[in-house]
Image (spheres, grey):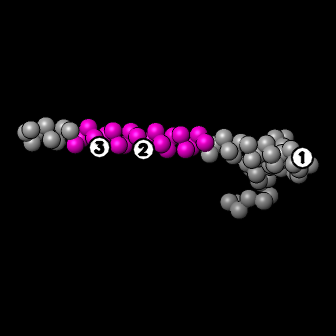
C-alpha cells in the first residue's frame, strides 16, 4: 500500500473512533437524563409538600429572581 492509502485508512479509522465515542456519549446522556427524570418523579411523590418542588413554586421563584430591582434599590444612581 502507498503512503496515501495508509493515511486515508488511518483517517477513516480515526473518524470511526470519534463517531463511536460520540454515539457512546449520546447514549450515556440519554440514560442519565432518564435516571434524573425518574429520581425527580420519585422525589415529587415522596414529599409533595416541599416548597420549590412543584412547577408553580419554581416559576414564582424564577420570576422573583429575574425581576429588576425597584429604582430605590439600584446602585447606579
Out of 19 and 57, give the one closest to the viewer.
19
Q: Which residue is denoted by mark 1 in the rendering?
A: 48
Q: Which residue is denoted by mark 3 in the rendering?
A: 14
Q: Is residue 67 visible?
A: no
Residue at horizontal 78 percent and vertical 59 percent from the top: 73
Q: Which mark is residue 34?
A: none
Q: CA distance from mark 3 to mark 2?
A: 11 Å
Residue at horizontal 7 percent and vertical 39 percent from the top: 2
**Range covered by the magenta-colored residues:** 10-31
Q: CA distance from mark 3 to mark 1?
A: 50 Å
Q: Which mark is residue 21?
A: 2
Local crowd size for mark 1, using a 10 Å CA cut-off: few (<14), some (14–19), many (≥20): few
Q: Quadrant of the N terminus?
A: top left
Residue at horizontal 68 percent and vertical 45 percent from the top: 35
Local crowd size for mark 2, using a 10 Å CA cut-off: few (<14), some (14–19), many (≥20): few
Q: Under tag 1, what secondary structure?
A: loop
| Residue 77: percent from left, percent from top | 70, 60
Position of 20 compared to 49: left or right?
Answer: left
Tell me if residue 1 comes above or below residue 53 in the rendering: above
Q: Kindly report the secondary structure that dominates the magenta region of the rendered protein.
A: helix
Foreground disc of the pair 3, 1? 3
Residue at the far bottom: name it. 75
Residue at the far left: name it. 2
Asked which quadrant contains residue 63, the reply is top right
Local crowd size for mark 3, using a 10 Å CA cut-off: few (<14), some (14–19), many (≥20): few
Q: Earlier in the sequence, mark 3 or mark 2?
A: 3
Position of 51 compared to 29: left or right?
Answer: right
| Residue 6: percent from left, percent from top | 15, 41
Q: Under tag 3, what secondary structure?
A: helix
Amino acid at each position: 500500500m502507498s503512503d496515501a492509502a495508509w493515511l486515508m485508512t488511518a483517517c477513516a479509522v480515526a473518524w470511526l473512533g470519534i463517531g463511536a465515542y460520540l454515539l457512546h456519549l449520546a447514549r450515556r446522556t440519554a440514560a442519565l437524563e432518564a435516571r434524573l427524570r425518574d429520581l425527580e418523579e420519585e422525589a415529587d411523590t415522596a414529599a409533595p409538600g416541599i416548597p420549590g418542588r412543584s412547577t408553580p413554586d419554581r416559576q414564582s421563584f424564577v420570576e422573583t429572581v429575574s425581576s429588576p430591582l425597584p429604582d430605590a434599590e439600584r446602585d447606579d444612581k
